[in-house]
Amino acid sequence: MKPNHKGTAQIFENPYLERLTKTHIAVPISIFIIIAIGLIIYGFMNGFLNVLSALGLFLVGWLIFSLIEYMAHRHVFHMETDTPIKKNIQYTFHGNHHDYPKDKDRLAMPPIVSLFIASFLFFTFKLIFGQFVFGIVAGLLFGYALYLFVHYAVHAYAPPKNFLKTLWIHHSIHHYKDPNRAYGVSSPLWDWVFGTMPERKK
């Protein structure tokens, strides 16, 4: 199906399940920002973080998320749909977005999924990083919130007349010219690292 600027996909026949697939972008962004701030405050109050460690760990977490964003988009959301099950999963999570890129209600996962992801990431990284988790996951969740904001902006608004315009161009290439390139949304960093930057015209 060719991308449609209007309309929305029907994912579930059950109207209640269908409603759960839609959310206003402000909800998950608020969830991740509030949790990120709470983690930093908790880390300071309990002596797990100081200003320098908080800043460093925050930036590490942000970088980790940018890699997760790229890998998930490239290898999960664009998985090979060589079986009916894979095809259904891919369409539910991402394929419908390519068919209806202007559907603002499906530019983010539902809040309950967002909370599950935040909890999973926290406990996973706590096992790996111990008390440093408060700074790292705060940066990671901030990265997630920034990704959601950028993704919403590039689909909902005209590109700005400044250096940020490159994000609009980058994501538009992925949607409308080459879905096998330009996987980074909040940053083209990992496209550059892994060789999936759009080819420039000679």
Image (cartoon, helix red, strand yellow):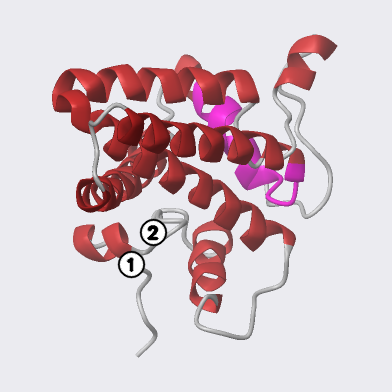
Label 1 CA crowd tier, 10 Å (few <14, some 14–19, many 20+): many
- Residue 22, by quadrant, is top right
Q: Earlier in the sequence, mark 1 or mark 2?
A: 2
Name the residue nearer the viewer: 42 or 174.
42
Give the left or right position of residue 193, taking residue 164 as reference. left
**Distance in Å between CA atoms under marks 1 and 2:** 6 Å
Q: Compare residues 69 and 6 and report the one nearer the observer.
A: 69
Q: Where is residue 162, by image quadrant?
A: bottom right
Return the residue at label 1: 197
For the point 40% across and 56% down, the residue is 184
Q: Is residue 94 above or below residue 196?
A: above
Query: Which dot marks residue 181?
Result: 2
Establish if 160 lies above or below 147.
below
Disc 1 is placed on an element classified as loop
Residue 180 visible? The answer is yes
Q: Position of residue 36 (x, y in %)?
A: 45, 37
Asked whether the beta carbons under mark 1 and mark 2 sit within 8 Å of each other, the answer is yes
- Left or right of 130 in this view: 64: right
Q: Residue at x 56, y 47 (%)?
A: 148
Q: Is residue 3 above or below residue 39?
A: below
Q: Which residues are magenta?
A: 88-104
Q: Is residue 16 left or right of residue 91?
A: right
| Residue type pointed to by label 1 | Met
Q: Any magenta on residue 146?
A: no
| Magenta stretch holds residue 99 | yes
